[in-house]
Amino acid sequence: MVEFSPEVIDTVIRASALLGAGFAMIAGIGPGIGQGYAAGKAVESVARDPEARGNIITTMLLGQAVAESTGIYSLVIAIVLIFTI
Amino acid sequence: MKNIDDPQKLQKEILKITYLISLLPIISSLLFGEYDITLGFVFGLVIATLLLRLKYNNIIRALSMEEDSAEKFIRNRYFIEYALYFVVLFSAAKNANLNFLAAAVGLFMIKFVVILMSIVDLLKDTFQRKFDEYK
Amino acid sequence: MIEFTPEVANTVITTASYVAAGAAMMAGMGPGIGMGFAAGKATSAVRRQPEARGPIITTMLLGQVISASTGIYSLVIAIFLIYGI
């Protein structure tokens, strides 16, 4: 039977928490693509209807701010993994 | 946002509001004697201002290109910008006189202001509509 | 009972944090793809409607300011992991 000393267990847990923090940040790809896509579509619709530009820009910015939230979730999880475990 | 048709004026408006809001953390960190926070914050803010100008110039250059080459151009320029962010955060992390987190917050300041402005716009719009209905 | 010397524990943790930092930097890809898409749309929009140039530039500038941020989040986490602030 294999037994681990408490230091080994601590090391492994700390190492895997750090790895997990790194992989959590891969989630940042999603909002980046989505926000750029939203900006592209907003530009298209400003060109189609320049009168409504104020509304389009406000809607785009709010949509991007909401799309940002998944990125912020991964950031929070990464920070929690790095600093608490 | 008043200056929606004129990107130059809109940049000036955004920067003015950003600097006004930044006075609060700068003055309070000076009062509490945390000079590394002040320096880090100002460093991040200056770099963010310069990168906004860079982004504007890149967009102006990209607009005169074909669709495919504009896509490639902006993508390559984004990676250059990413490298610049890396250098800024790296020097903030290595230098004891610059607070790392304050530099990161300084970099994000313009973004917060843009989102704040759009929320204020939306609220104004909603209240205007309600008011018109009430009348 | 398996035990680690302090050097082994340090090595494991350092390796894990470097691998994680590399994984976190992958998130820098997303904003690049999205911004490129927006730029492509903007050029075709300006070609179609040259008089709406001002609002198009404004829309794209604001969109790009917001989309760049997820990349910076991942950068912040990567530097946290490498230098252990």
Image (cartoon, coloured by chain):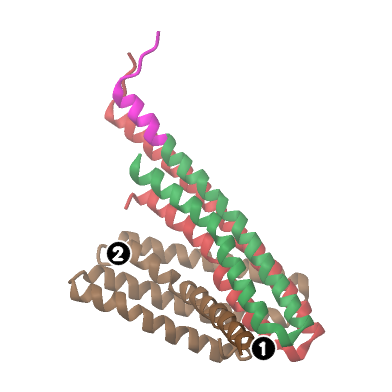
Chain colours: A green, B brown, C red
Give x and y (percent) for residue B113: 47, 76
What amino acid is labelled 2 in the image?
Asn
Q: From the viewer's perspective, is C44 left or right of A31?
A: right
- Tell me, yes or no, if residue B72 can be seen here: no
**Secondary structure beneath disc 2?**
loop
| Residue C30 numbered mark, or none | none
Q: Which residues are magenta?
A: A1-15
Kind of residue sitting beneath label 1? Gly
* Residue B16 location, quadrant: bottom left
Above or below residue C75? Residue A39 is below
Q: Nearer the viewer, mark 2 or mark 1?
A: 1
Indicate left or right for C77 with C28 as reference.
left
Residue A26 lies within the magenta run: no
Query: Where is residue A79 shown, x and y percent of the image?
Result: 40, 49
Residue at image mark 1: C54
Screen quadrant of the C terminus of chain B: bottom right
Q: Quadrant of residue B27?
A: bottom left
Tell which of C54 and B87 is nearer to you.
C54
Residue C15 in percent (x, y) is at: 42, 38
Which of the labelled discs sits on residue B99, or is there none? Answer: 2
Disc 2 to disc 1, C-alpha distance: 38 Å
Q: Residue furthest right?
A: C48
- Magenta stretch contains residue A3: yes
Whether residue A40 can be seen here:
yes
Seen at 34% across and 43% down, the residue is A84
| Residue B3, above or below C20 | below
